[in-house]
């Protein structure tokens, strides 16, 4: 008899049955679910395991590099950059979330959508745009004839990363505000507290988990960023790892730095989990949730609107405008028409690799999601969590590990499309797992049980019954993997097939040689391909837009 369906004895107190979508199955999980889940977990754990083995081959040199002054400098640089970007993103994202959720700001839903769209702009495209606008000989200097302070270094890296990462805080805090019980703020106002006092004493403390989650996402984004810090010449972990890998034949230094970056990432995860604590922000009573009454901004309405417009203009309109500027300038200067053909070839290569990664990730996420919901145990939970290992590792670390594995043990696959797709899957599989698991939770197990009762084998039930029912989760997870893989730079640079240009490599090759006009077309195509699906996802999942 299945767990959660037993009939209690007459003398016992009746126990409510477990919700249908969460009812677990007893017995051993079937092989057709366990095997692909093991493959997914093993692939996610492989890069970290190989880095540990590689470092253990030269322990003395690894320890020397670990305690060197140059390593300490890189660690300090990265820590300062993370702190500055998180602080700057909070100063931008939290007010944006509050203004577009809780106030009578004109067009607040549209501004929320526009404020979230910088997520589609890769950091290296944003860095290129700001160098093209504010750098030596850029659009501002050539148009106005003035000399601006240098954009390179810590200041420029902080500016660019804040403008492309603050949407993480905007979306997490906005989601928390939408779900917040308005009765708490109304009670504070009824006690005579002003709107500012209520915001400071009631709303902000309740938003601490959302702020922490957004801050963690930004910190992980900064740790994994390679394009912006490289173009802006700031020595963080990722740039130093890449330089160490490319500079010489001894790759031990790159491995040690990669492991130190992993340790930094794990430390951030532990700190965030402890700081988050067990804050509860749910409603105490029951009943229908009331909508929030917008707070009247009064005389602050137009300054608030100016702030929102400025953020959108600087983070979204300026980069896109600079790309258009350099594209037109290149056309006027007689850029060869063959670049247009090369751009579309690069676009096809990017779409092909990203689409394959999305399909593979969705296929692997299905058995992992079913196992974690239908056969939940310590073993299946461990398998599910193991798939998240790759998501916690920066792209350059995954790429570096797969380079070593491919060169030593999989020569025919080294720098092939298959290896690049594998890197994308390891990096972004958790996005698909989360979406699929949420869909499996909504499917009643009785539907699958009925099919098995009719004599259908388990694998046919998975493909003919479960898969169609969880199609929304599969599509959403695949779309997220596709959009993220389109923007991935370090894995594409290190693992991409030789001579097989993608949009990311085309932009990187042109911008690293200061050919800004040549980089404009692939950058605009990349933003366009990523922007349309992202806008649809934001409207459907977050209710953003007009």
Image: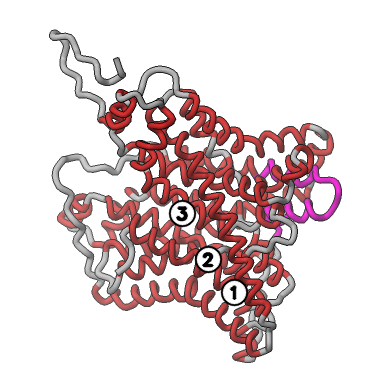
Q: Residue at x 31, y 40 (%)?
A: 280
Asked whether 337 or 95 is in front, the reply is 337
Specify the segment rendered in magenta.
235-261
Quadrant the N terminus occupies: top left
Task: Give residue 129's mark.
Answer: 1
Cα–Cα span, label 2 and label 1: 10 Å
Of labels 3 and 2, earlier in sequence is 2
Dot 1: element? helix
Image coords of residue 433 (percent x, y): 46, 41
2 and 1 marks in contact (CB < 8 Å):
yes
Q: CA distance from mark 3 to mark 1?
A: 26 Å
Res 434 seen here: yes
The outermost residue toward the front is 455
Please check the rendered image and state whether residue 47 is part of the magenta-colored stretch, yes or no.
no
Spot occupied by residue 167 in the image (x, y as percentages of width and height): 44, 61
* Rendered image quadrant of residue 143: bottom right
In this view, the residue in front, 329 or 268, is: 329
Q: Secondary structure at mark 2?
A: loop
Counting from the top left corner in percent of width and height, residue 250 is at: 85, 46
Q: Give the tally of numbered discs.
A: 3
Residue bearing mark 3:
479
Q: Dot 2, crowdedness within 10 Å: few (<14), some or many (≥20)?
A: many
Is 252 inside the magenta-drawn segment? yes
Q: Which residue is mark 2?
A: 121
Q: What residue sits 33% from the left and 36% below the top?
A: 441
Crowding at dot 3, Cα within 10 Å, few <14 / some 14-19 / many 20+, comes out as many
* Residue 335 vertical placement versus 493 (above, below): below
Above or below for 484 versus 5: below
């Amino acid at each position: 008899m299945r767990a959660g369906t037993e009939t209690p004895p007459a003398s016992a107190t009746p126990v409510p049955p477990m919700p249908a979508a969460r009812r677990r199955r007893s017995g051993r999980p079937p092989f057709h679910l366990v095997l692909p889940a093991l493959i997914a977990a093993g692939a996610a754990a492989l890069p970290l395991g190989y880095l540990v083995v590689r470092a253990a081959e030269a322990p003395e040199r690894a320890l020397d590099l670990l305690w060197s002054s140059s390593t300490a400098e890189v660690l300090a640089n990265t820590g300062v950059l993370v702190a500055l970007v998180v602080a700057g993103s909070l100063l931008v994202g939290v007010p944006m979330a509050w203004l577009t959720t809780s106030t009578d700001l004109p067009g607040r839903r549209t501004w929320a959508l526009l404020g979230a769209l910088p997520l589609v702009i890769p950091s290296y495209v944003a860095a290129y745009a700001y160098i093209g606008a504010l750098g030596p000989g850029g659009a501002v200097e050539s148009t106005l004839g003035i000399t601006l302070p240098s954009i390179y270094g810590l200041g420029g890296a902080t500016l660019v990363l804040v403008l492309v990462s603050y949407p993480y805080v905007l979306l997490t805090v906005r989601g928390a505000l939408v779900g917040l019980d308005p009765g708490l703020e109304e009670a504070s106002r009824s006690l005579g507290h002003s709107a500012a006092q209520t915001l400071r004493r009631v709303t902000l403390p309740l938003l601490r988990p959302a702020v922490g989650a957004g801050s963690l996402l930004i910190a992980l984004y900064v740790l994994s960023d390679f394009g912006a810090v490289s173009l802006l010449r700031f020595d963080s972990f990722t740039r130093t790892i890449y330089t160490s890998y490319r500079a010489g034949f001894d790759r031990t230094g790159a491995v040690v730095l990669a492991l130190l970056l992993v340790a930094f990432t794990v430390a951030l995860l532990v700190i965030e989990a402890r700081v988050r604590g067990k804050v509860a922000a749910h409603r105490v009573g029951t009943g229908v949730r009331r909508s929030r009454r917008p707070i009247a901004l009064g005389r602050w309405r137009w300054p608030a609107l100016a702030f929102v417009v400025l953020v959108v203009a600087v983070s979204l309109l300026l980069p896109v405008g600079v790309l258009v500027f350099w594209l037109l300038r290149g056309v006027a200067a007689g850029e060869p028409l063959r670049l247009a053909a090369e751009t579309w070839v690069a676009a096809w290569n990017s779409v092909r690799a990203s689409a394959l990664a999305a399909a593979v990730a969705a296929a692997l996420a299905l058995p992992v999601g079913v196992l974690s919901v239908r056969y939940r145990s310590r073993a299946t939970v461990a398998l599910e969590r193991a798939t998240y290992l790759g998501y916690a590792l920066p792209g350059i670390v995954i790429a570096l590990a797969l380079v070593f594995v491919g060169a030593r043990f999989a020569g025919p696959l080294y720098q092939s499309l298959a290896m690049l797709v594998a890197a994308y899957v390891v990096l972004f599989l958790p996005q698909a797992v989360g979406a699929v698991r949420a869909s499996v939770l909504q499917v009643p197990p009785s539907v699958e049980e009925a099919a098995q009762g009719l004599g259908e084998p388990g694998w046919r039930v998975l493909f003919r019954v479960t898969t169609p029912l969880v199609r929304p989760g599969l599509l959403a997870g695949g779309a997220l993997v596709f959009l993220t893989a389109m923007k991935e730079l370090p894995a594409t640079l290190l693992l991409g097939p030789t001579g097989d240009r993608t949009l990311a490599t085309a932009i990187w090759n042109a911008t690293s040689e200061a050919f800004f006009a040549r980089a404009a077309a692939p950058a605009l195509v990349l933003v366009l391909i990523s922007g349309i699906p992202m806008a649809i996802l934001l409207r459907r999942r977050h209710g953003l837009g007009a």
